[in-house]
Amino acid sequence: MAGRFITFEGGEGVGKSTQVKLLAQALEQSGASVITTREPGGTRGAEAIRTLLLDPEGEGWTPEAEVLLFAAARSDHVERVIRPALQAGKWVLCDRFVDSTRAYQGGEGSVSDADVLTLHRIGSKGLLPDLTILLEAADRDTADRLRARDGDNSDRIGGRDQSFHHAVAQRFASIAQSEPERFVRVDGSGTPEEVHERVLAAVRGRLGPIG
Ligand code: TMP
């Protein structure tokens, strides 16, 4: 049987990686075979592209070069890791995927949402998750979490100004609204355990019993 592909999306410091871990543990306890991965990254080549993209000391990229690099990293990740795992019947939990490119790069410069989706079709044969969990939290809460996590060491994209991140959150919300069958919007406020309960309810609600 083909596996299940779940992605976690949202702005900076909203708790995605914690929720990926907690969901993986819950699925494993119920007997599922799970891999967790992240973007940009997940393969040697894609991790190297991650460094190129996010290095705070780097020179930076034009919006067009940036979107091509994210698409290239994703192509490698999908073909070498995600698709083989799904074909082997595994659950794949991924911290960010194409919707991050749509939200972060799709409204910037000359790059449109349609352009991002075209690159995804070329690079990754348009693979989409079975379920995308959009974690949402108030800007104030995430700013506090980020300060605790990164201090002054935020990366090249994470370190952009608040109006950029506000626009990203709005683009995520509108993408989720336009694809209600794939997305569940989950309130990211409260303790990690409280958010995890909401995530579990979303997964069961959309994909059925997990164990
Ligand atoms: P992370 O902090 O969730 O690991 O993500 C790294 C940064 O890369 C974060 O600032 C979001 C950004 N990003 C994009 O701008 N576009 C993308 O497609 C992805 C996957 C991440």
Image: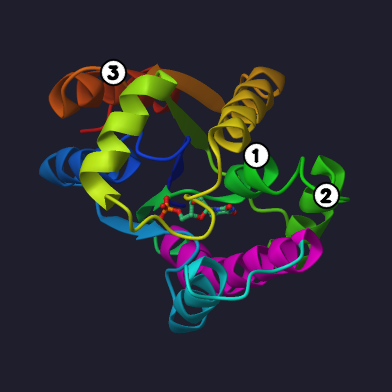
179 versus 159 height, above or below: above
Say which quadrant the C terminus sits in.
top left
- Name above or below for residue 17 compared with residue 15: below
In front of the other: 136 or 211: 136
**Residue 195 on image: x %, y %:** 24, 22
Distance of mark 2 from mark 1, alpha carbons? 13 Å
| Residue under numbered circle 1 | 103
Residue 120 locus on image (x, y percent)? 73, 57
Badge 3 amino acid: Ser
The amino acid on which the numbered mark 1 sits, given as a three-letter code, is Ala
Instruction: Please determine whether, in this image, residue 206 is positioned above or below residue 34.
Output: above
Task: Name the image quarter holding residue 175.
Answer: top right
x and y, in percent, of residue 53 in the image: 56, 69
Residue 161 appears at what percent x and percent y? 55, 40
Q: Nearer the viewer, mark 2 or mark 1?
A: 2
Residues rendered magenta in the picture:
63-86
* Residue of label 3: 189
Labels in figure, total? 3
Q: Secondary structure at mark 3?
A: loop
- Numbered badge on residue 109: 2
Where disc 2 sits, the SS reads loop
Q: Amino acid at mark 2?
A: Gly
